[in-house]
Image: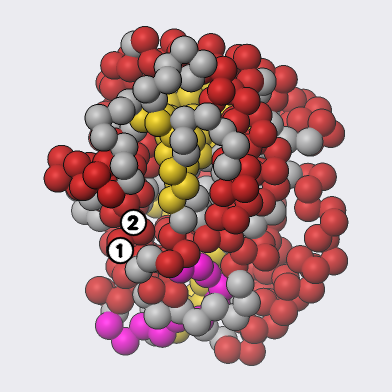
Amino acid sequence: MRVFLVAGEPSGDRLGGALMAGLRNLRPDVQFDGIGGAEMQAQGLVSRFPMEELSVMGLVEVLPKFFHLKRRIEETAQAVLATQPDVLITIDSPDFGLRVARRVKAASRIRTVHYVAPSVWAWRSGRADKMAKVIDHVLALLPFEPPWMERAGMECDFVGHPVVNEPVATETEMSEFRAAKGLGTAPVLLVLPGSRRGEVERLAPVFGDAVGRFLSDKPDWRVVVPTVPHVADLVGAQAANWVGNPVVLSPDTQAPETSAQAKRAAFATADIALAASGTVSLELAAQDTPMVIAYKVSWLTQKIAERMVSVDTVTLVNLVSDTRAVPECLGADCTPETIAARLAAVAAAPGAQTDAMRLTMERLGRGGEAPGLRAARAVLNRMPG
């Protein structure tokens, strides 16, 4: 069985890696091709070009890279058509993946699967109908998404999220992490300013100012800043002058498992976290770490989004748990003053998010079959013939 996969950012790479492991478990003869990052490469993928080239977010932010991305779309679609896989699986990053799928469908009958349902319940509900023209089957991360996809004419399976199957840091791992990083018994603030360069450039200065305000009367606190390889230099430079004697965790020189262990230990060790909006809220919830979510985009992208968004929260923990337990600082509220105030409120009542985080993990499948294996089984069960 031949599978062509396309992922465009770290969260998609994690999904792809788990899916590939599940496929290999169920179909040992499977062969992989496509684009992906470290997690997918660890499962045997030789990426046709660096996945990081696709890690662009925001309507305005894409414009400078438009022609390069367009060339990569054509190149990827031609690679799929040339190799004729049994299935093309595009993972998240719909602006890139669905354009590839459209070109593939126009020239072939190759089966197409998209992993991560677009958030049509939040904005641009018409996307599902457009997507149905080029996608046969959707793998959904959230339990309420299948009906939206099925109404548009696509097959859809809720498969959960791989985060619920990731290990929870042990007390020993947390103690060893504290010792290795010289944290002692200090309270820890985790700061996550994003996994894309554009995000870090926008958010890190705001986050740094907010950290300074929050810690102004907390001299005993320490700051830990996990990052990913392609933005490690930028994050390190931004955090160099922050208060809290920041420890920047860069996976550049570590084996994947060592890096993953350090990351989950950092998440679990933290007393609270300040994070950019995204899948990271689920990673924090998996380690029972209370959080504040903050995010902003360019002015024009923000104005366009305000007209299109139909939900009052973007944080997955809030959405899945059907609560508003996690405070957000979005758009005009993404200011150092507001962020610092909300960090202070969370620090004063860290247990306020506990029930919402645990309910989120339960609804996403914790305790059941590994989501990557569920996703693989769904792909195979829906294959024709």
Magenta residues span 28-38
Q: Is residue 35 shown in magenta?
A: yes
Could you classify mark 1 by the number of other residues whose Cα lies within 10 Å: few (under 14), some (14-19), or many (20 or more)?
A: few
Q: Is residue 163 above or below residue 302?
A: below
Q: Which residue is mark 2?
A: 260
**Label 1 sits on residue:** 257
The amino acid type, in three-letter code, at marker 2 is Ala
Task: Identify whether 347 is placed above or below 250.
Answer: above
Residue 152 seen by the camera: no
- Contact between marks 1 and 2 (CB within 8 A): the answer is yes
For residue 247, which numbered disc appears in the image? none
On the question of residue 175 being in view, the answer is yes
Location of residue 245 with respect to 180 vertically, above or below? above
What residue do we see at 38% from left, 15% from top?
347
Please tell me which residue lies in front, 159 or 318.
318
Which class describes the residues within 10 Å of circle 2: few (<14), some (14-19), or many (20+)?
A: some
Secondary element type, mark 1: helix
Q: Residue at the spot x=14%, y=45% of the render?
A: 172
Q: Position of residue 36 (x, y in %)?
A: 52, 69
Distance CA(mark 1)–CA(mark 2)? 5 Å
Does 183 appear in magenta? no
Q: Residue at x 58, y 60 (%)?
A: 230
Q: Position of residue 295 (x, y in %)?
A: 62, 31
Scheme by which the image is coloured? secondary structure
* Residue at position x 44%, y 43% in the image: 247
Task: Give how far across and how far down residue 40 sits, in percent.
Answer: 43, 70
Instruction: Tell me which corner region of the image, top left, top right, bottom left or bottom right, holds residue 124.
Output: top right
> Is label 2 in a helix, a strand or a loop?
helix
Q: What residue type is disc 1 on?
A: Glu
